[in-house]
Amino acid sequence: MIKIFILSSTPEKVGELIYYGENISLGYAESGEDLIEGDERCGRLETGDLAKFDEENFYTIVGRKKRFLKMFGKRINLQEVEHILRQKFNIEVAATGIDDKMKIFITDEKFLKDVVPFLSEKLNLHPSAFEVKFIAEIPKNSSGKVIYSE
């Protein structure tokens, strides 16, 4: 039997997506001895995805657990920041950073001066919390996922 669970029992409330089932991977074996260990996860996989479900039990992934910054005491979801910037400016964007300093990379130079005031107001954070840079192209791997380390 397969179960999907969110660490929230309230519809539309975001929580971590947890998957239960007999088909959960045992992980990566580096030696034959590793295979002896068996199912150390007990059929449970903490996906690292943040999700919510609606009244009809449809699940929507809204971000990643590790793509957050803590900015002046507020947890900011970098994936959500990218989403609102794409919606507002219709641009390609990648957001990274360290706590209290978000770096935003955009591929359209004409919006360089607009991003910080918009985010500052939207997130209720001082403009000094943001740094915006123009780059010709957002680096992506062969499957189209952003390579944030670059």
Image: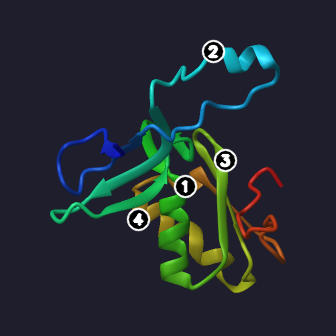
Residue at the spot of label 3:
97
Dot 2 amino acid type? Glu
For the residues labelled 4 and 3, say whether their Cβ atoms are less than 8 Å apart. no
Residue at the spot of label 1:
78
Instruction: Give the mark toward the camera: 2 or 1.
Output: 2
Among the two numbered marks 3 and 2 on one chain, the one whose residue lies closer to the N terminus = 2
Instruction: Give the mark toward the camera: 3 or 1.
Output: 1
Query: Which quadrant of the view contains residue 114?
Result: bottom right
For the residues labelled 3 and 1, say whether their Cβ atoms are less than 8 Å apart. yes
Which x, y percent locates residue 21? 42, 39
Which x, y percent locates residue 132? 69, 64
Q: CA distance from mark 2 to mark 1?
A: 36 Å
For the residues labelled 3 and 2, say whether their Cβ atoms are less than 8 Å apart. no
> Element under label 1?
helix
Q: Relative to 40, does residue 132 appear above or below in the rendering? A: below
| Number of the label disc, if any, that sits on residue 122 | 4
Q: CA distance from mark 2 to mark 4?
A: 49 Å
Among the two numbered marks 4 and 1 on one chain, the one whose residue lies closer to the N terminus = 1
Residue 38 visible from this viewpoint: yes
Q: Is residue 35 left or right of residue 114?
A: right
Residue at the spot of label 2:
37
Q: Nearer the viewer, residue 79 or 32?
A: 32
Q: Residue at x 31, y 55 (%)?
A: 52
Quadrant holding the C terminus: bottom right
Dot 4 amino acid type? Lys
Q: CA distance from mark 4 to mark 3?
A: 18 Å
Among the two numbered marks 2 and 1 on one chain, the one whose residue lies closer to the N terminus = 2
Instruction: Give the mark toward the camera: 4 or 1.
Output: 1
